[in-house]
Amino acid sequence: MSSKLLLQSLDRLKAWYEIHQPVVVDGFNEGISSEEITLLEAEIGIKLPESLKAMLQQHNGTDAFVLFDGHEVCRLLSANEIKAEYKTQQITIEAQEEMAQELKLPFHPHRLPVLLYLSGDFSYLHPDTGELVYISQEGDSSHTFYDLSEFIGQMADRLEKGRYQLDEYGGIRKIEVSELWQNIRKFLNGYLAHRGELFRPKIALNDQQKLLKTIRQIHPNFNELAYNDLPESLRMTLRAHNGQTSEFRLFFYEDKSYYLLSVEEMMREIAGQKGNGKLLLPILSNDKDLLYMDLLNEQLYLNKMTYIGIDWTDFLLIYWENLQNHRFGVSDESLFAKNNF
């Protein structure tokens, strides 16, 4: 992602804060000059990735923990903080490298600390590739963004879509799929109480193993896939409900309505198929069309071929919003969207 897109994403992020928590915007410090960037590079002996240069020229760090990576809040370090922390970590760089090798974590001897977390952990930029990597102090967890631009872009996207929201203390939190399902189930059970129980109980352990076995048979390259490797949104869905009790189509998107498949129905739909490169699993059906989830990124495909532009969590957020605002109608066979959304 280019520096231009990074700055556009940053503007979107700040625009969201302007609406929902204006005081936070004051925590984005004034940027530094290109001459100060050059001086920083000379002092640490490392050329900064273009994304970091652009970020520091726009904002020389943040005073508060106003950023969020999907796991924990963090803040952007200033140029002086980056320099000080970089020099500090160089004192124990050999020990850090040994620990990284032992725990099989990504490591670069000249990694640049750029994000500080409340826990005291850091995210580091790879000076050559620009890759952004979070590593806990204990070394027991890590996650990676392609670069700083992807990190800021993802946060802006998820704020705008409602996947990140303010908590009661004014911090950022992730909306959990389990929370969405609780709200959806409560609403539907009240609105459609005359239909009785709408959903089946959560998935059983033996059904988890059957599902994995079926996926591995179709996609032998994923023969070491574990159940916890499946997307969290899928696991939380199956933990909430293993499909519906009937084929009444509760779910809608644009001009189509669907019912939620059980694990047995998912396996029946894909039985005997051969993997085509994408790791796709059907999740919704209307007997004519299927919506598939890509198990590597949650993205949804209509009949395997057409990416519909959202992932499963986005789908549930949009669906929940439309339920709350009563943007749907009811027939003998389904709920349906009153207006395309």
Image: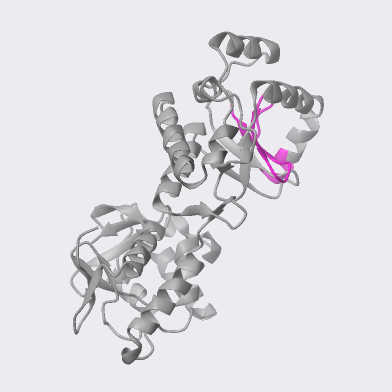
- Can I make out residue 224 in this image? no
Quadrant where the C terminus is found in the figure:
bottom left
Q: Which quadrant of the figure has residue 195?
A: bottom left
Which residue is painted at 50% across and 25% down in the image?
51
Which residue is painted at 53% across and 55% down in the image?
174
- Can I make out residue 158 in this image? yes
**32 horizontally vs 12: left or right:** right
Instruction: Check if residue 107 falls in the magenta segment.
Output: yes
Please provide percent x and percent y for residue 49.
53, 22
Q: Which of 288 and 75 is in front in this view?
A: 75
Please provide percent x and percent y for residue 125.
59, 30
**166 horizontally vs 138: left or right:** left
**Magenta-drawn segment:** 100-126
82, above or below 224, in the image: above
234, above or below 134, in the image: below
Which residue is painted at 55% across and 63% down in the image?
228
Q: Nearer the viewer, residue 88 or 64?
A: 64
Instruction: Check if residue 6 falls in the magenta segment.
Output: no
Q: Which of 128 and 25 is in front in this view?
A: 25
